[in-house]
Amino acid sequence: MASSSSSSSCSSSSEKKITLKSSDGEALNVEKNVALEFEPAKGFLEDNSEEADDEAIVVPLPNVSAAVLSELIPYVKQRLELSAKPVQKKLIKAFDDQFTRHLSDDKLGELMLAANYLGVNYLLDVLCDVTADRIKNKSVEYVREFLGIQNDFTPEEEAELRAQCPWAFEGVDQD
Amino acid sequence: MGLLPEGCIANVISFTTPRDACRLSSVSTVFKSAAESDAVWERFLPPDYPSLLSDAASSSSSSSSLHFSSKKELYFSLCHNPILIDEGKKSFSLDKQSGKKCYMISARDLLIVWGDTPTYWRWTSVPEARFPEVAELICVCWLEIRCKINTRSLSPRTLYAAYLVYKPTAGSYGFEYQPIDVSVGVVGSESQTRTVYLDAERGQRKRYQYPRRIGLFNRSRRQASMPKENDGCYPKERDDEWLEIELGDFLNKEDEDGELEMSVLEVAAGDWKGGLIIQGIEIRPKQGK
């Protein structure tokens, strides 16, 4: 973790560090290759490529909190290491499962928003899959509550939608 | 999570099932829009649906081609209106709840022993069939019907069941109390065999009046390895007014090549029997599993 701006012996660019600034103003030091996985950071670095010293760059990420970033960074770092090796899909799946298994519903939502904003599509897919599992075969009311969504249908509109496919409402899980 | 953009919601919905997607349309206007998007329904359609559609277009004699305004509309059309493929010898449809693939193999595509001998079997057409031709059993002693389908053409990770789809004619005889051996299994591995009855009348009597009248004769000798199932030994009436009898089930795993073989056999007693119209053998996901 020691910073070494004159790291001439460093062969890999991946060890260069970039600073990300979270929505709540915290600065997080990350390897450049990890930062490049975040679309806004990648764009920012490309726009500021004339800056000779990466260490001096601070990438603002105004939509992601430090708490969420500090969960995302180790995930992306390990995921990058995994995909660099010729490993089986199964291993990556196991790694993803381990990452998502214990996520609370709230955390899942925060991470999904962040992954969407940061354009980390492989993580977004995994999170969407986990979210889907949590709302499968659940009632409409449960899903609204779970995702914090306001019902913006009129009672008539909602009744009509239900009437279109009564079979889809039969036998859903108890809330 | 209330702030999730529509694309992200669509992504979540595409990991659920068609049944979930229909229900999730009622959550909110954004959910409705996401749940009806082509991105979602494209995922619910089987990956090879374009080739099945073009097969259907070339198999169909009518010039009406399939046009749909959305993938959801296409999906439901395939659920409700089976398309004829393989030169009209099979039909293809989707299971509405799950989007899994369903086939019916027409009588013409079945191997029917003595099927080409007009004294025993007759080829005819009936308006209520989905195929141009059905096979009518005049009379045989040796009843043997077989067919095969490649497991790759079925949806992966799915428990399927096969059903003989038929109906008795007015003069049907020889099937009362007549055990029929049916089986389903992958060629080269052990198949699951069980005993059924094709006589609908007896099935109805049993169901409604004598629910436990097993002592009439010894049915259990061929059923030793079969889990007992409600009425599984008797035909059920379908929505299309044909009868069906389950031949057995089969768990299709992922990426395994194999030929699934189904058979209907009554050669042991050797009595004369006749008066059935065979539409085909249907393979579809087993419900409630």
Image (cartoon, coloured by chain):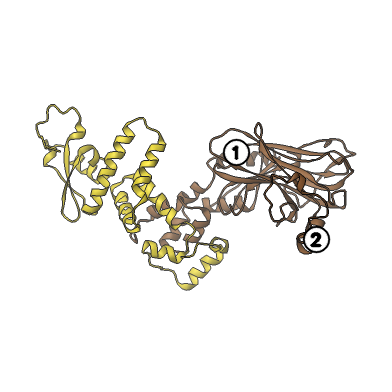
Chain colours: A yellow, B brown
Furthest residue in direction bottom, as rendered: A155
From the top left corner, tell me how far across and down residue B67 is, in percent.
58, 49
**The N terminus of chain B lies in which quarter of the figure?**
bottom left
Residue that label 2 marks: B205
From the top left corner, tell me how far across and down residue A13 is, in percent.
19, 32
Query: Which residue is pictured at 51% across the width and 70% down the height?
Result: A159
The amino acid on which the numbered mark 1 sits, given as a three-letter code, is Ser
Residue that label 1 marks: B153
Q: Secondary structure at mark 2?
A: helix
Query: Which residue is pictured at 55% across the width and 41% down the height?
Result: B156
Camera-near label (2 vs 1) is 2
Tell which of B12 and B113 is nearer to you. Answer: B113
Query: Which residue is pictured at 20% across the width and 55% down the height?
Result: A23
Occupied quadrant, residue B88 = top right
Occupied quadrant, residue B148 = top right
The reply, left or right, for residue A42 in relation to residue B108 is: left
N-terminal of the two: label 2 or label 1? 1
Occupied quadrant, residue B122 = top right
Q: How would you rate the neighbour count of disc 1 (Cα within 10 Å): few for under 14, some for 14-19, many for 20 or more?
A: few
Q: Answer yes or no: do the residues labelled 2 and 1 have beta carbons within 8 Å? A: no
Furthest residue in direction left, as rendered: A6
The amino acid on which the numbered mark 2 sits, given as a three-letter code, is Arg
Q: How would you rate the neighbour count of disc 2 (Cα within 10 Å): few for under 14, some for 14-19, many for 20 or more?
A: few
